[in-house]
Image: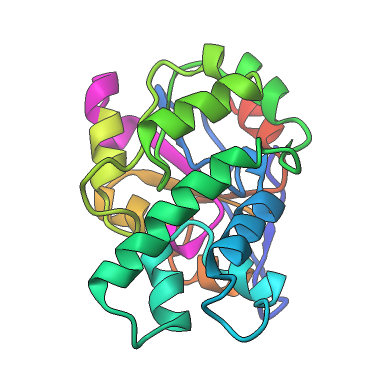
Amino acid sequence: MVADAVCPDSRKESVPLLRSFPVYLFDLDGTLLDSAVDICGAIQQTLSGHVAEPLAFDYLKSFIGFHLNDCFIEVLPHYTPEQLHDLVQTYRVIYPARGHAATKCYPGALEALRSLGGRKGTATTKGTPTTRAILEQFGFLPYFDHVQGTDGFPCKPAPDVLLRSLQALGGKREDCLFVGDSSADMEAGRRAGVQICAVTYGYGKREDLAKWNPDYWISDLRELCGAD
């Protein structure tokens, strides 16, 4: 059962009881996996030599879920598109080379995916091959019917990755729940026309998530399995 959500202004807001859905889409970083140390570490390595001193971890963590360019443009606004492209390519070499050694599954995440009914897919800013490899490494892959990353089309908060995953699963928008941790997730879900569920343990700020009026709030993915 889902408890009443606590809004940023500390007032309680009544949230509908979570129901079961025929289709579930999941964000990856900050939702299934606590991967911030590896992601931010790879960004710091990428920017080494481009900035005067390492950028703060919490600052870099705020960009997780958005395109890498959002971070690089803010940090290095004078860089050309070509230079920014080179930074992205460098990151894409450094990040997998870390082996996801500091990345962990969130408590209950594997149990939830194992027990949850319905068809399941991903909707992440990572590319599909990287997403598939990470899901396999951490034991999630067998529980997904479709793996969808962002491959050459607009990333969240655009709805494209959700719509492609939903299409691959043969699902209808009204039958789908998208679970994520960032404002980009919530906006993408709203624009895709699906129900949205915000997790409270990820990297997004609660007040930013609340702006999109999530249909549900959960603090543990196992809450999805208790829905009627």
Would residue 162 be found to the left or right of residue 209 on screen? left
- Classify the position of the N terminus by image quarter: top right
Coloring scheme used: rainbow
- What are the residue bounds of the magenta stretch? 167-184
- Position of residue 154 relative to residue 211, above or below, is above
User: Which residue is depicted at the point 65% across and 42% down?
Assistant: 98
Q: Position of residue 222 (x, y in %)?
A: 70, 30
Total residue callouts: 0
User: Which residue is depicted at the point 45% across and 47% down?
Assistant: 92
- Position of residue 18 relative to residue 86, above or below, is above
User: Which residue is depicted at the point 38% across and 77% down?
Assistant: 73
Q: Nearer the viewer, residue 162 or 24?
A: 162
User: Which residue is depicted at the point 71% across and 41% down?
Assistant: 103
Picture quadrant of residue 212: bottom left
Q: Position of residue 219 (x, y in %)?
A: 71, 47
The answer to whether residue 183 is magenta is yes
- Position of residue 197 relative to residue 12, above or below, is above
Picture quadrant of residue 54: bottom right
Q: Position of residue 140 (x, y in %)?
A: 59, 21
- Position of residue 144 relative to residue 11, above or below, is above
Picture quadrant of residue 150: top left
Whether residue 150 is visible to the viewer of this picture, yes or no, is yes
- Classify the position of the C terminus by image quarter: top right
Q: Residue furthest front?
A: 49
